Amino acid sequence: MERLPVWLRNRRELSSLRDVRLRLRKGRLSTVCEEARCPNISECFSRNDATFLILGDICTRNCTFCSVRGGRPSLPDPDEPVLLAEAAGELGLRHAVITSVTRDDLIDEGAGHFAACIKEVNIRLPGISVEVLTPDFSGRTELLDIVLEAKPDVFGHNLETVRSLYGTIRPEADLDRSLAVLDAANRHGGPLVKTGFMVGLGESESQIEELIVLIKEAHVDILTIGQYLRPTRKQVPVSKYWEPEAFAAWAGLAKGLGIRYVIASPFVRSSYRAGSILEEIREQDRR
C-alpha cells in the first residue's frame, strides 16, 4: 500500500505455514499472528512458535491500528484451555504465549479463562513456560490477581503508543490505567513483567523518550519496541518509518535507565523471540 523503506522490504519466507495452521484449525484455535497480520509469521511458524489468541477473535474495543475485528463476541469456548494445552504439546512448544481480544462484555473480562488456560498448560505440560499478554481488565486489580495467581512465568500488557495518541489510536484505553496494571503486576511478585509499544503512528522522539521513562517507573522487566506497519487499508496509515538507528538509541536509553531486557527493531513485536528472551534472563540469573 505504501512504499516501504529498504530495511522493511524482502522479509524472507522461511517455511510453509500450512502444517501449523492445520493443527490450529483442528483445535478450533486462533493466533494473534494471523489475526493481526504479523510480519514475522513465517519465521515464527517455521519454528512451531505461535501466540494463541483466546476468548474468540472479535474484540469489544476498536483500536484504530489493529486488524482484529470489533463487534459483539460469542461466549467463550469452555474446551479452549484443554485444546490450547493439547496444541501446545503437539507443536512441541517450550514456551507458550497466550493473549486475547478484550472482553469488556464478560463479568470477569476473561480473567478466569486466562487462568484456566495457564493452569491447563502447567498441568499437562509441566516442562514448558507460559507467558500471557492481557488486556487492562478495566484496571480492576481483583481480576489481575486471578491471572497472576495462576502463576504465569511472564505477565505482559502492552502500552502500544504514547500518551498524546491514545485518543485516536486507543480511544477506549488509558495510559495511566495501563501503567498501573504493570506496576500492580510487579508488586504482586512472581512473574517477569513485560510491555511493548509501536512507533510510526505520529509520535515525536521526545514523547517516545518520555514513555520509556514511565515504563521504567512502572517497574517493567522486559520492553519491546517495533515499527507500526499498517495491516490493511482499514487501519490508520503509517505516519513515519523510523530508521534502525533510532531503535538502537531507544534500547540504549531504556537499558541505561535500568530496564532489564530490551529488544527494539522495526520488525519486533511483543511476542517476538519471547521464549528465547526468558531463557536469556534465566541464564543471567543462574550466572
Image (cartoon, grey):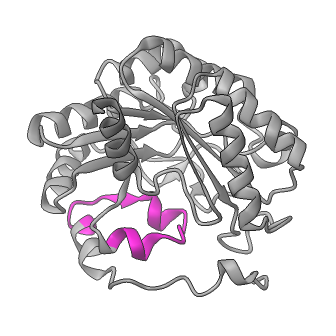
Residue 212 coordinates in the image, percent (x, y): 72, 36
Q: Is residue 219 visible?
A: yes
How many marks do you count on the picture?
0
Q: Quadrant of residue 115?
A: top left
Q: Is residue 76 visible?
A: no
Residue 167 higher or lower than 109, as above or below:
below
Residue 178 coordinates in the image, percent (x, y): 65, 28
Q: Is residue 257 left or right of residue 17?
A: right
Magenta-drawn stretch contains 163: no
User: Which residue is at 49% across, 12% downward?
Assistant: 187
Residue 173 higher or lower than 145, as above or below:
below
| Residue stretch rendered in magenta on the structure | 24-45
Residue 203 higher or lower than 1, as above or below:
above
- Pick the front one: 26 or 129: 129
Residue 29 coordinates in the image, percent (x, y): 30, 58
Q: Is residue 116 left or right of residue 133?
A: left
User: Which residue is at 55% across, 57% downward?
Assistant: 269
User: Which residue is at 65% across, 65% downward?
Assistant: 266
Magenta-drawn stretch contains 41: yes
On-image quarter of the N terminus: bottom right
User: Which residue is at 34% across, 26% downward?
Assistant: 112
